[in-house]
Image (cartoon, grey):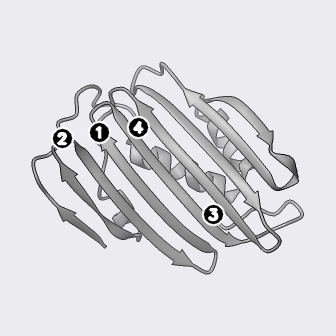
Amino acid sequence: SSVVLATPSLAQKGPTAGPDVIEEGYNFCLDAVAGLDYLRESLAAAGWTIEDDATYGPYQTYINASLVGDGTTAARYLYATLEQYPTIDLVYCTYEVEGAYGTPDFELLGDYGLDGEYQTFDDGTYGVWEIGEDTGAQLWLLQAQLDYLYFQLDWIGPGYRDGQTTGGK
């Protein structure tokens, strides 16, 4: 459940159309948990450009992607890495918006069943959420300020091998 500690809200300027940036970041980061092949397909289908797609040795793979100038929301950037340990996988995913974006739905993660809270201050809205399941633990961090949003997922769960995906979707 979400706990909201309200103080004067941060006025967002800019677009009112376009994606809910929390929902977009949430879905793309869970796509990374489902597997980086799945994430590549989702990003391509949404018109994103994959800037970098490589490995750091045999145990870590990463994707760096962007969507700039779609006419609805400022520049958006995504970075996802999958680290594979002997029995556990770790996914680290960040989603950033640099510039104007529509007012996000801060209740969304609570609506999706994650436990956490967010707080709104004069300089922005900050939040943390978590959920632990048999398929893995999700830890979400949010920083939303005027013309800048940072959203992060740390996921840790059982490792899957031989082409299987991890525990996301």
Q: Tag 2 or tag 1, which sits nearer the N-term?
A: 2
- Residue pointed to by mark 2: 10
Residue farthest along the left direction in this orientation: 8
Mark 4 and mark 2 in contact (Cβ < 8 Å)? no
**Which disc, if any, is residue 19?**
4
Whichever of labels 1 and 4 marks the residue nearer the N terminus, that label is 4
Q: Is residue 48 left or right of residue 158?
A: left
The residue tagged 1 is 145
Q: Spatial distance from mark 2 to mark 4, Cα to Cα?
A: 19 Å
Foreground disc of the pair 2, 3: 2
Residue 107: percent from the left, percent from the top? 29, 59
Q: Secondary structure at mark 1?
A: strand
Q: CA distance from mark 2 to mark 3?
A: 32 Å
Q: Earlier in the sequence, mark 2 or mark 4?
A: 2
Which residue is at the front of the view, 2 or 98?
A: 98
State how far apart marks 4 and 3 are (Cα). 21 Å
Residue bearing the label numbered 3: 168
Pointer 4 or 3: first along the chain: 4
Front-most of 142 and 110? 142
Residue 78 screen position, x and y as percent: 57, 39
- Mark 2: amino acid: Leu
Nearer to us: label 3 or label 1: 1
Q: Which comes sooner in the sequence, label 3 or label 1?
A: 1
Percent position (x, y) of residue 21?
Answer: 40, 41
Please name which of the two marks, 1 or 4, marks the residue nearer to the observer: 1
- Which element is circle 4 on? loop
Tell me which amino acid carries mark 1.
Gln
Taking the spot 47% from the left edge, 22% from the top edge, the residue there is 70
Q: Amino acid at mark 4?
A: Pro
* Disc 3: CA contacts within 10 A as few (<14), some (14-19) or many (>=20): some
Q: Quadrant of the N terminus?
A: bottom left
